[in-house]
Amino acid sequence: MPDPGALLLTGATGFLGQELLARIVARSDRPVVALVRAADDAAAQARVDGVLAALGEPAGRVRGVAADLERDDLGLGALAANALAADVTTIVHCAASVSFGLSLEASRAVNVEGTRRMLDLALRCAAFGDGLERFAYISTAYVAGRHPGRFGPEDLWHGQRFRNPYEQSKCEAELLVRAAGEELPVQVLRPSIVMGDRRTGWTTSFNVLYQPLRAFGRGLLTMVPGRAEAPVDVVPVDYVADGVLALLDEPLRSPQTHLLVAGDRAATVGGLGRLAGRYFGRPAPELLDPERFERELLPALRRNADSRTRAVLESSAALFPYFAVETRFDDPRTRALLEARGVRCEGLESYLPRLLDFAVQTRWGRRLPARAEVLAAA
């Protein structure tokens, strides 16, 4: 077989990126390049080797390259970008700004313009060396925004409104990738809300659902705005990472989009409340009408609550809209394809206690052990 060329990964120091990197290194001998933000290539290599050590993998297995998604030519310079492109045949673009609190301009700078620059690099790969086999873009199922009803892999822009700049910028970036599919072999992979490993609970990212769950466990969030029947589409990071690796092996004869979601196995807001209540030994939180909460109750709480409660409200307010989602994600084709490869998604009720055990034992990330230690103890 011909040499497959190097695989280039962005976002390798992030939560999902680390899980992808661990699997890529463990399951393949092909050269791997990780683009990371650093002052120079030596500093980039040190960052990558540190990640590999935490993953239990040998240093030097992955080449670290200093890059910046917000600079022209990724901060590499044209000559260095061309030289890199000559070695790379697969790109997995996982890097993104995932903050809900940034302005649209700041979110676009990384998620849209950064993706544009990665697509420019992909065009260089197609022109140099052995060409480009695949540009895999890690998007999010929440490009759906507030779209009501089913949202499948063929759906993207329907004029939907968005809950935050993160969703909008990821949708705009995916539009770029879809347009590039006329020239490049593109593959879009859309996970929903990514949480810890279902076997060990391992995570380095205690945001999104972890924040309100922590506040609820401390007795600080006894009421939340939401609808009992609204879906909470959550997937464990091992399902997403295993799914991405499996889909990277899928023949790519035309542009593809895959949803890595719980779908009809998703929990509901009411079900999540009951699960959390059972774990923490508390009554499930009371669900309030979302519109009335936003219009009347939240301003009053911000004015009158004590400082501790206000802090919880501010940290959780950006997440409250996800308790009134009207979108149902659906991708039976991808689910069947992955299940045939032994990659199966389970319902949140089967692994939420493990996620919470890990969170509590590590004090919600304050005493985080190395991933390799957690796996060895499992």
Image (tube, rainbow, N blue to C red):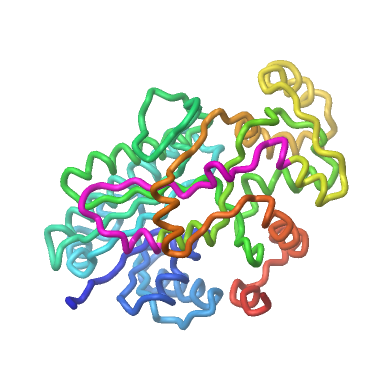
**Image quadrant containing the N terminus:** bottom left
Q: Residue at x 12, y 58 (%)?
A: 127
Q: Residue at x 24, y 66 (%)?
A: 88
Which one is in front, 370 or 194?
A: 194
Q: Which residues are magenta?
A: 245-272
Which one is in front, 109 or 207?
A: 207
Q: Residue at x 28, y 55 (%)?
A: 135
Is 359 placed left or right of 220 in the picture? left
**Image quadrant containing the C terminus:** bottom right
Q: Position of residue 194 (x, y in %)?
A: 55, 51
Q: Quadrant of residue 377?
A: bottom right
Whether 46 is drawn above or below 211: the answer is: below
Q: Position of residue 319 (x, y in %)?
A: 63, 36
Q: Position of residue 317 (x, y in %)?
A: 67, 33
Q: How many marks?
A: 0
Is 304 placed left or right of 88 in the picture? right
Whether 52 is drawn above or below 216: the answer is: below
Q: Residue at x 38, y 59 (%)?
A: 10
Q: Quadrant of residue 204?
A: bottom right
Q: Position of residue 57 (x, y in %)?
A: 49, 80
Q: Quadrant of residue 198?
A: bottom right
Is 140 placed left or right of 288 in the picture? left
